[in-house]
Image: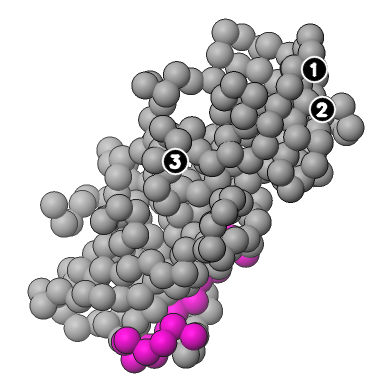
Amino acid sequence: MLPEDTAKIPFLQKAFTITFDHRVLRANNNLAGIGKDNGGYGVEIGSFFTRGNVLEVQHRTDGVYRFDVVQVDATTIDLYDLGSNLVYRLVGYQKHNFNYDMLFYDNIRYFLQEYGIWRKVYSSKEGALNPFDSENYLHFVMGDEGLFKSSKTAPDVPLSSVFWNFHGRYTISNIHGENNVKLLELDYGRDIERFELRVLSNDEKIELFHINSETTYEFVGNDFIAIFRPKSNLEEQTRERFKDILPTVKHKIQKP
């Protein structure tokens, strides 16, 4: 869902999916655990009403929006915001043929940002010694796309005591022929650390296979950031989402 203007409608900009469910408006705003809330339709974010071609949305926090609904084809509609010149295009699916995994991996950088800190919990005995061995924490900054932080702070300290030793840029690429493995590159200035990135354990753990040293690391996500999750005691933040078009590279998978 992308607007045709630089202005934005917050609840549409945050959402990965929108569902109109018997006057209840639902959305999947987080990638971690996507497809599990309310039968896959997401959390309740408001209500909606229709009159002719006009859709009125009453969002719990963003207020009231009115749209002119234009059918593009059998599965596509355009929402024209009557209060601005914004247009959002929605493509419809039946739940049984919607690919949650594809949505997840196409937008995986947002998943990495949904945890305030990633804590290293495992390093394999296999693999050569390398500088990344001393990195114990990672943070992928929400709101500053492509910025990461890393820390050599000792393991198992209170997370509030973690000191970020380094700030750098990161990129994520598709790997030709692979759906669930991505190439993650952390730019440390003089060196670029390259990893095969996999997601494990109920969307709470990631595996980083260091390509040069053939060392495997596992990081667990802490401080989950809920993007509008009603009645949640988790930290909540807003986030603007833009369609990701990841570059595709040729890379021979080194870890089965």
Residue farthest to the left?
Answer: 126
Query: What's the amino acid at mark 3?
Result: Asp
> Does residue 2 appear anywhere in the picture?
no
Query: What's the amino acid at mark 1?
Result: Val
Tell me where residue 182 appears, x and y as whole percent.
Answer: 34, 51
Front: mark 3 or 2: 3
Label 3 to label 2: alpha-carbon separation:
26 Å
Residue at x 71% of width, y 44% of height: 60
Give the SS element for disc 1.
strand
Residue farthest to the right?
Answer: 83
Q: Which residue is mark 1?
A: 54
Please check the rendered image and state whether residue 85 is part of the magenta-colored stretch, yes or no: no
Q: Can you say whether 165 is above or below 231 in the image?
A: below
How packed mark 3 is, by other alpha carbons closer than 10 Å (few <14, some 14-19, many 20 or more), is some
The region drawn magenta spans 144-160
**Disc 2 + disc 1, Cβ < 8 Å:** yes
The label shown at residue 66 is: 2
Earlier in the chain: of badge 1 and badge 3, it is 3
Label 2 to label 1: alpha-carbon separation:
7 Å
Query: What's the amino acid at mark 2?
Result: Arg
